[in-house]
Every structure is written in structure tokens, then in C-alpha cells.
Image (spheres, rainbow, N blue to C red):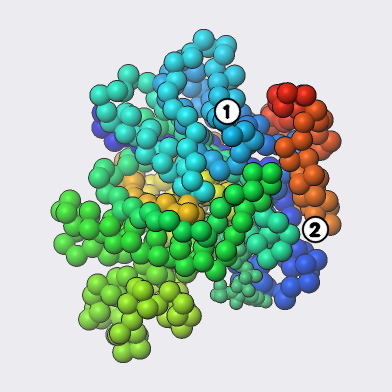
Amino acid sequence: PENIGIKAIEVYFPKKYVDQVELEKHDGVSAGKYTIGLGQEKMSFCDDREDIASMALTVVKQFMQKYNVDYKNIGRLEVGTETMIDKSKATKTFLMSLFEESGNHSIEGIDTTNACYGGTSAFFNACQWIDSRAWDGRLALVVSGDIAVYASGNARPSGGVGIACILVGPDAPLALEFPLRGTFMEHVYDFYKPDLSSEFPTVDGPLSIVSYIKALDYAYLGYLKKLELAGESESASLSDLDYIVFHSPYTKQVAKGFGRLLFNDFLRDKNNQKFALIKDQFENETLESSYHNKNLEKAFIQLSKEAYSLKTTPSLLAAKNIGNMYTGSVFFGLASLISSIPSSQLLNKRIALFSYGSGCAASLYSFKVTGDLSDIAKNLDLINRLNDRICVSPPDFENIMSLRQKTHNAVSYSPTGPIEELYPGTFYLESVDSMWRRKYNIA
Ligand code: ACO
């Protein structure tokens, strides 16, 4: 099979959001801390009517309807998520209820978990299944997303909710570039979820930021090496990448990441004319010496500003307006790019994608645009959908967060969130019975 990759994308995000300007005022932090400091405008959230299984059901059903895919034609279905409602039963198994009517129970793949990276691993698995002798000719679905919620405090405004469904197969307009991939993994306690009774992560914020940047460094260097080995570039650099989609915990981190790529280019080619202005100042810096160097960070954000606005800003539409979606973030980045740049302009371009999951696991890889993406953009209808939401006041947002906290893991429970505040067609949690069995319905 040729051009294995993404054939279509659908996304789902909840109808409710809180405005970051209002949240700044309500939290009593300085004006601009969330909007400029974190680079966020709006944050999606959901009440007790939605969980990871309901959201996965919503996005898959919506996807299959929009693209009119036959349920029998799916041979693999994987879920990448770190949002758990069960330590054993995979979210994938809930999705099998959608396949019941078709009689298709022959579907490989299961859940993959490591912070924000599970969806990337699931996507690689799906592509490699199609590229292997195990492939039976059918298509694969990858479902990737999370409910990102933090305890009240400084991490809370970096939450969000969103889930993506991707159709993977041959002859894809977004073709994965085998074997162009750089990966970095190591053991680090930056963000993790050891308290199984809570929905919240345990976070070392400053460490997570350095860990993200370090993983980016080595994934990027690994990727550049592959570009050179493949004969795609003699001296690989940012200029080999037309667009770069990043995992976005908040968009300011992405700007820092982009600047960091340019710093890597600088270390590889200090005498290049484009670094003339900053060469003396940063001549002796190394990757390791510079993780906490704010002046260097600022200088490279500044130096990369124009390239950033061309290559990366168009992919941040959803991230700015929804927030972090953990495993969903990178696929919402692709969806945003497709929604922001005309398909004709994307044709034959290389789109690189950086995925970071705390703990940590990270990869930088790329797609070649080999076909028309305008139908996907039309079906996504992202801009209109982002504008068709309910703005909730910060006090109401906090009440809903407390409700989720109180009812997390509840047994013999009926959620109370208003069903009329969901988009029509959204799956919602109707009840949890005395054996923790969840029942869903459709709004
Ligand atoms: N106007 C403009 N900028 C401001 C303002 C203001 N009024 N106030 C603060 N800022 C800036 C700060 O200078 C800082 O900028 P910098 O990043 O360039 O240093 C930025 O806003 C953030 O302010 P801090 O005081 O550093 O923020 P705080 O420590 O309160 O929280 C943090 C930030 C640690 C990222 C927190 O939101 C968090 O823990 N989030 C979850 C972890 C996370 O997302 N990590 C990222 C990678 S891992 C992952 O994807 C989960």
C-alpha cells in the first residue's frame, strides 16, 4: 500500500467554555496572565454528563455519519487517552457498541496510555498495521482525546477537553513519511496520575516545561538525522519543514518550542548569516546549559517570530480556543491547520508534528500532503463550531468542576447536568448502576 496516513479527521469538543479574561479577573491574577502569559483565550470543559467513553462514542458516530464509512470496513480501532473510568475495561470496548448492528466484531487494537502521547503511539500502530503482513485490507480508526482538568490553582487555566477520530488507510492525502521520525523517552516525574481516586494529575509544572523542551530537542535532532539519512536534505533544518504542529498544553509553550527548534539550528550552524545578530551572545550555550536561560528563550522566540506565524500559528486555532486536550491536542492541531490554510496551498507540503507526553514519551514525525484536504476542512467546519458555544461564568464553571470532583468514580449515580446544553447527537451518561455499569444515551 502507498501513501499510508490520515484519510479524514473529525473532532468533538463540549459546548461549554469559560473565557480566560473572565477567569483572570475571577481568580484575582494579573490581567494577561492566562491570555498573554499562557496564550489562551477560551477553555472547554464538561459537566458530569460526559466522560471519556461518551466523548469517544460521540466522535466515532459523528465521523462514521459524516464520511459514510461502512462499519464492516474497519479492521482496527485504537484509542489513545489518559482519561480513565476503568483500570481494566478499555474505552475501545465501549466503542464496540457502535459496531454491534453491523455484526463486525473482528476489530484489532485497544487503548494506549502515556499522558498526552497515547494517540501518537496508537496512530503509529495503525499505520504500521497497514504497512505490515498482518493487514487484511480494511481501514483503521484512531480515537485520541481527553478531559484535561487540574485542581484549582495555577494549573487550572491550562485545562481543556477534546477528542479526535482519524481514519487511517492507504492513498491518504496526509501521507505519513516513513521512516522520518525522531523519538525521545526517559523516566521523569513531571506530570502523572498516581492518585487513582482523583481525576486530577500531580504536576511539577516547571519540570514539565523543561522536560517538554528537552524531549523536543532530541526528537528534533533525531528527525533531522533521518531526513539527512533519507537523502531528503544535506544539512537539515527548520527550512525543510513547511508547517509544524506541536502538542499544545497552552500556546505560549508552543512559541517557546518553535524558538527552541531555531536554537537547535543555531547550534548546528552557528556561522549562518541568519544568526549574525545573536551569535556572540549565545556562542557558548549548549542544549544542557540553556534550559533555564530566559534571555535565550526570549531571543529565539523573537528571532523565529515570522517563521512561527507562517509555519505554526495556523495550527493553534483549536488549542487557543479549547485548551489542552492531552492526546487530542496534536490532531486538533492538524485539524486547525487544514481549517486555516487553503488546501491548494498545502498540496505537496511537508507538515511536521511534535507529540509530547509527560513521564515522558515524545516523537517528531511528518506528513506529505499528497491530495485534496478541502472536504475534510468542510466537514470539520471548525471555525463555525468554535463560535457556536455557550460561555459559562467562572463561578458556574467552578461549581461544575466541584460537581465533577464530587461525583468522580461515584456508584449508583445519576448525573444532573442539563442535556439541552449538549450539541444534538452528543452521547451522555445517563446513569451508573450499583455495579458501576455505565449507561449512555444520545441528546
Ligand atoms: N501578563 C503577561 N504575562 C504574564 C502575566 C501577565 N499579567 N503574568 C504572568 N505572565 C507570564 C509569566 O511571566 C510566565 O511567562 P514565561 O512562561 O515566559 O515565564 C507565564 O505567564 C506563566 O506564568 P507563571 O507565573 O510561570 O505561571 P504559573 O507558574 O502560575 O503556572 C504552569 C504555569 C506551571 C505552566 C501551570 O499552568 C501548570 O502547571 N500547567 C500544567 C502543566 C503543563 O501544562 N505543562 C506543560 C507541558 S506538560 C503537558 O502537556 C501537560
Q: Please say whether residue 404 is visible from this viewpoint.
A: yes
Secondary structure category for the residue under label 2: helix
Q: Is residue 76 above or below residue 276?
A: above
Q: Is residue 431 above or below residue 244?
A: above
Q: How packed is label 1: few (under 14 Cα within 10 Å), some, or many (20 or more)?
A: few
Which amino acid, by three-letter code, is at mark 2?
A: Pro
Q: Is residue 288 above or below residue 393?
A: below
The foreground one among 225 and 202 is 202
Secondary structure category for the residue under label 1: loop
| Residue 442: quadrant of the picture | top right
Q: Is residue 60 above or below residue 325?
A: above
Q: If you read the primary sequence from the N terminus, does the residue marked by circle 2 or circle 1 appear first?
A: 1
The residue located at (64%, 44%) in the rendering is 196
Q: Which numbered dot is residue 394? A: 2
Front: mark 2 or 1: 1
Left-right relation of 142 to 415: left
